Amino acid sequence: MRGAKSAKWVAGAAIIALAATACGGNDSDSGKDMNSGKADPNGILTAQLGEPQNPLQPANAKESQGSRVLRTIFSGLVDYEPGTGKLTYVNAESVTPNADSSVWTVKLKPGWKFHDGTTVTSKSFVDSWNWSANVKNNQTNSSWFQDIKGYEDVHPAKGAPKADKMSGLKIVDDNTFTISLTGPVSYFAYKLGYDVWAPLPESFFKDPAAAGQKPIGNGPYKFVSWDHKKLIKVRKFDGYQGPNKAKNGGIDFKNYTTADAAYSDLRSNNLDWIEQIPTTSLTSYKQDLGDRAIDAEYSAVQSIVPAFYTKQFKNIDPKVIQGLSMAIDRDTITKTVLHGTRTPADSFVARGVIGYKPGALGDIVKYDPAKAKKLIKDGGGVPGNKISIQFNADQSHKPWVDAVCNSIRKATGVECTGDSKPDFQADLNARDNKQVKSMYRGGWVLDYPVNSNFMRDLYGTTAAGNTSGYSNKEFDALAAKADKAKTLDETVKMYQDAEQLLKNDMPAIPLWFYKVNSGQSTNVFGKIVYGQDGDPIFTDVQVKAKK
Amino acid sequence: MGRYVARRLLQMIPVFIGTTLIIFLMVHILPGDPIRAMWGDKAADPAQVASLRHEFGLDQPLWKQYIDYMGNLFQGDFGKTFGGREVIDEMSESFPVTLRLTAVAMLIEIIVGIGLGAWAGLRAGKAADTGVLIFTLIVISIPVFVLGFLARFVLADQLGWVAPNVQDSTDYAQLFLPGFVLAMLSMAYVARLTRTTFAENLRADYMRTAMAKGLPRRRIIGVHLLRNSLIPVVTFLGTDVGGFIGGAVVTEGIFNVQGVGNLLFKALQQREGSTIVGVVTVFVLVILVINLLVDLLYAVLDPRIRYA
């Protein structure tokens, strides 16, 4: 088989597998032997990855591709337990708040090293954050630092920065520093799990652009090479002291032009993990892959959002929106049109996030045409008796938008059409400029696993993620109070109360939660475990030893 | 001849400026902001968006952006991608790949297309001719992506003769499958065109003369007939190079070839003006030069044509 000749950079195991599939090509062996043989601690895993949009700098990964690599190269202070969302310490010994959660003290585990041998100290973190927050340095995630005192000095709304340090960051000693916030945020430690909070070595600041091409981190893997649009190699870092030491020898991130191309490579064992089963194979992949098929939920939600600045929704009675929500047959649509790639949403907050309450929205997300009709009637009807849902046509949203519309039309008689924009840029442009005619498609993937992220950051009057013009003073007050709570538990509890408030107000109609539909090759030992963001926990993936 | 070439080269300048301007305007007139779109569904920070827009010169008026861009272009600077890479680097990585793929496709197209066409043309009206006609019509009527998936399904997944994807685009053997799929459609056209000209020229006066002179059949067909019949075919092949580069967008996507088609597709998705205009500029240059070469080839093929 010709493929084997050029597979010199694929783990040798793949070559054997190739030879095995060369005859016939019927590779739908079930995963029965997933746990046969033993794992090779130095085996190399190949995983799919698109070209990262930006250089590999911790605060510059706005999309999942860059962030997937960065998370292997850099370790943050904290991480989350998959499934529960509980906080775990990685590079931090402890992260402790003061009485009102406005000043946080971080203690590092001493003796950590960057891949270039230099020591990770408080300065590595503070310098990194100051540099990343600086508007001049054009890091796409710079606004993540806005809770910190002095953020406006390095990141003014207009003009050049007045300082290059945030006053809120103070180094106490080599392994201790404090963070003063502009106000109390009881779950601040949870935010610290995001990529942007990674430390940077001295060498980074000498030439940030070069460092973006050859990142040096403190994570479980060290960066080896980046052959643009083809391959990114990372290898196990032997000096790593964190709890999440790599159980494999390294990862080759391979770039594929399409999901179909990646899928056929997965089936011929040229690739061990793909990011998403192509739409064309969604109906057959479970037969193709058997136990090696992956179908797991992650914390992201898709909604349709009324544009509250339009004449139509300006003074709407929330009952009407509740009615529209009850006119959508989520169960059937997720099963048929979406091939089971989503699960019906029952709350504003996605599952796997702390504070998610099953059935928080009760009947409002249940399909009930009679009740839907009644609610709309009681609320005074839909102005114009007609809605449209704006979406971007460059991704496959049209099928479900049409299905939702059909469901609404059938159940209530309200006319509903899709309002397609040619691409995502045009779609966002209409949203940002408040030009949406009626409703639009909204999506949200978690930033950190606390329910506030799915409410305050989307429906707060001044929240940057709020593009629908929704505003509820009562909710804002409740959110502010919740952020000041003494403990995280209290905060979460108050946000759960706030969710009930939103239920009566309906700032959006949650439709469904996202799922990862993926697969693994026969080279992987055991089943891959996923994190809440829908990506594998790469350090835990084991590769089979060659026979 | 020299004067003709010089005139043609001068004519290229307005064509070149016109096309780049149109593409540039098209990319920039679309609604939406590529920088803002980096944030996706998440909220974008206006200060950071403004700072990035400034870095890429997107805050300048459109005419100034174009003039700056062209000015840099003449110094060989194609600008930067949003990811901070030089567009020229991206292009020098992907153009050779597509050129290799195009060369493979060209070769397949010339050998199979002209072969089939000549075979059918010499047997005009017989079963072989009808067979080739049916085959080419089928190929013409199937969309490229269907052909691609079919070819992969049969040759790679079912028979296991070839790898399903291109793993290494410097390996010509691996480029055979995508090259074959890319060539199929044009190959059918070349076969039809060759067949028609062959059949027509067979009845031409000079053929009768050659036969009457008692020239050997091999020489009649190989020299007199072939050379005259190839004029329209060469024209078609020339225009086809441009078609191949365009068609590569689909084929490269199917077979995981990281070439220009793919570069352009990704750049369009991200609205990366500098990359799009850069790639199209090179396309335009390539097509203009090839058109000139085709016209000059006429003179070689047909002694009746002389360029003053």
Image: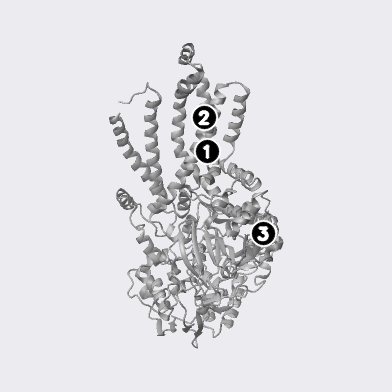
Name the residue nearer the viewer: A364 or A92. Answer: A92
* Residue B224 visible at all: yes
Q: What is the distance, in whole Å, between disc 1 and disc 3 at their CAs?
A: 38 Å
Host chain of mark 2: B
Q: Residue furthest front?
A: A547
**Label 2 close to label 3 by CB (< 8 Å):** no
| Res A88 quadrant in image | bottom right
When asked about the image quadrant of residue B122, the answer is top right
Q: Is residue A297 left or right of residue A121?
A: right
Local secondary structure at mark 1: helix
Do the residues marked 1 and 3 share a common chain? no
Q: Which mark is residue B114?
A: 2
Give the number of the mark in front: 1 or 3: 1
* Foreground pick, B136 / B30: B136
What's the residue at 29%, 50% (across, down)? B75
Residue at point 39%, 44% (across, down): B282
Judging from the image, what secondary structure is the residue with disc 3 in? Answer: loop
Residue B183, numbered circle: 1
Q: Position of residue A411 (x, y in %)?
A: 68, 57
Tell me the amino acid under the disc marked 3. Gly
Q: Nearer the viewer, mark 2 or mark 3?
A: 2
Rendered-image quadrant of the C terminus of chain A: bottom right
Alpha-carbon distance for marks 2 and 1?
13 Å
Q: Which residue is mark 3?
A: A340
Q: Amino acid at mark 1?
A: Ala
First reached walking from the N terminus: tag 2 or tag 1: 2
Report in which chain the residue with disc 3 lies: A
Q: Secondary structure at mark 2?
A: helix
Q: Residue furthest bottom?
A: A99
Q: Where residue B197 appears, x then y in whole percent?
A: 50, 23
